[in-house]
Image: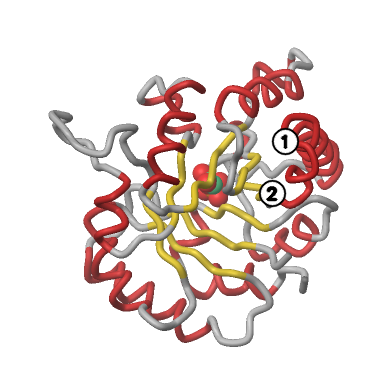
């Protein structure tokens, strides 16, 4: 399976610079050996999707509500993302889990809503620094997987150690190898044969300089890129470091 390089633009980019960034990605996307996805903030999804139409670069949201519609001020339904041109959505990012108290159960409901609306979910899991210091990283991630993924699950998992997100501290190749092998085993244990085919992204300070070594680790099916996805040049350099299928 091709690796997926996904950009999480977080709460960055007004519409004009977002479109400019999307055009830059579009220009360099020809011939890369991976699938490409960008996830702009809600307000930029529609113009970015228009700028990327026909390019093969997919567009996603960064969250959605668990319900299809209703009295939920400030929230956005999966079907609205779809209507704006998104085909993917990130769910359960650690910033949502931390800043908005999102639980595994809520994440699972959101995943179901996303799939219902025809979106492919990227479900994020990962331990905090304290949990790792206490030696609980596999236990925590195992629980997050069983609590956050509905059965059956058609989507992607992103392993993002919280202490590596936006910090410039990347997990070592060995940490990543251990955690991705663990996530694969858990997926196979929980989903049977289908667990072999679920892509597992690594996220947390991935950048051009470390992408090649991280993307070469067994069971790494791509990257979820924050900071380095805000410059087309860096994002594309990571994409060029992807392993051909
Ligand atoms: P980062 O963010 O690449 O800036 O560490 C990754 C993420 O939060 O998805």
237 lies left or right of 241: left
- Residue closer to the observer: 62 or 129: 62
Compared with 161, 61 (above or below) is below
Indicate how the structure is coloured in the image.
secondary structure
| Quadrant of image for the N terminus | bottom right
Residue 60: image tag? none
Q: Foreground mark, 1 or 2?
A: 1
Q: Name the mark on residue 191.
A: 1
Q: Position of residue 187 (x, y in %)?
A: 74, 36
Which residue is nearer to you in this view: 219 or 211?
219
Helix, strand or loop under label 2: loop
* The C terminus: image quadrant: bottom right
What x and y, as percent, mark residue 86?
A: 36, 60
Category of crowding for the residue at label 1, using alpha-carbon neighbours closer than 10 angstroms: few (below 14), some (14–19), many (at least 20): some
Quarter of the view holding residue 178: top right
Task: Categorize mark 2 by other alpha carbons within 10 Å: few (<14), some (14-19), many (20+).
Answer: many
What residue do we see at 59% from left, 41% from top? 153
| Coordinates of residue 139 in the picture (x, y in percent) | 74, 18
Question: Which residue is more in the foreground, 70 or 182?
Answer: 70
For this orientation, the residue located farthest to the top is 134
Q: Are marks 1 and 2 in contact (CB under 8 Å)?
A: yes
| Residue ID at (77%, 31%) | 186
Disc 1 secondary structure class? helix
Task: Give the Cα separation between the discs numbered 1 and 2.
Answer: 10 Å
Name the residue located 40 percent from the left edge and 45 percent from the top edge. Answer: 116
Residue 214 lies in quadrant = bottom right
Residue 46 picture location, percent across and down: 25, 65
- The foreground one among 190 and 201 is 190
Question: N-terminal of the two: label 1 or label 2?
Answer: 1
Give the residue number, with chain letter if any, for mark 2: 198
On whether ligand 1 comes within 8 Å of the CB at mark 1, the answer is no
């Amino acid at each position: 399976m091709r690796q997926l390089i996904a950009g999480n633009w977080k709460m960055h980019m007004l519409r004009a610079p977002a479109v400019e960034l999307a055009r830059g990605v579009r220009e360099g996307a020809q011939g890369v050996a991976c699938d490409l996805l960008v996830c702009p903030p809600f307000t930029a999804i529609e113009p970015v999707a228009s700028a990327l139409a026909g390019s093969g670069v997919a567009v996603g949201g960064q969250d959605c509500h668990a319900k299809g519609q209703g009295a939920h001020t400030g929230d956005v339904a999966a079907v609205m993302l779809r209507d704006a041109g998104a085909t993917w959505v990130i769910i359960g990012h650690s910033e949502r889990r931390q800043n908005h108290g999102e639980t595994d159960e809520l994440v699972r409901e959101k995943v179901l809503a996303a799939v219902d609306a025809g979106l492919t979910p990227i479900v994020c899991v990962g331990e905090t620094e304290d949990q790792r210091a206490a030696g609980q990283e596999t236990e925590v991630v195992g629980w997050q997987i069983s609590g956050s993924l509905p059965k059956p699950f058609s989507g992607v998992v992103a392993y993002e150690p919280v202490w590596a997100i936006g910090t410039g501290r990347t997990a070592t190749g060995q940490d990543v190898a251990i955690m991705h092998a663990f996530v694969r085993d858990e997926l196979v244990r929980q989903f049977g044969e289908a667990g072999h085919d679920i892509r597992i992204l690594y996220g947390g300070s991935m950048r051009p300089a470390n992408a090649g070594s991280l993307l070469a680790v067994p069971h790494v099916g791509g990257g979820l890129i924050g900071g380095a996805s805000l410059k087309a040049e860096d994002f594309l350099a990571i994409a060029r470091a992807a392993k051909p299928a």
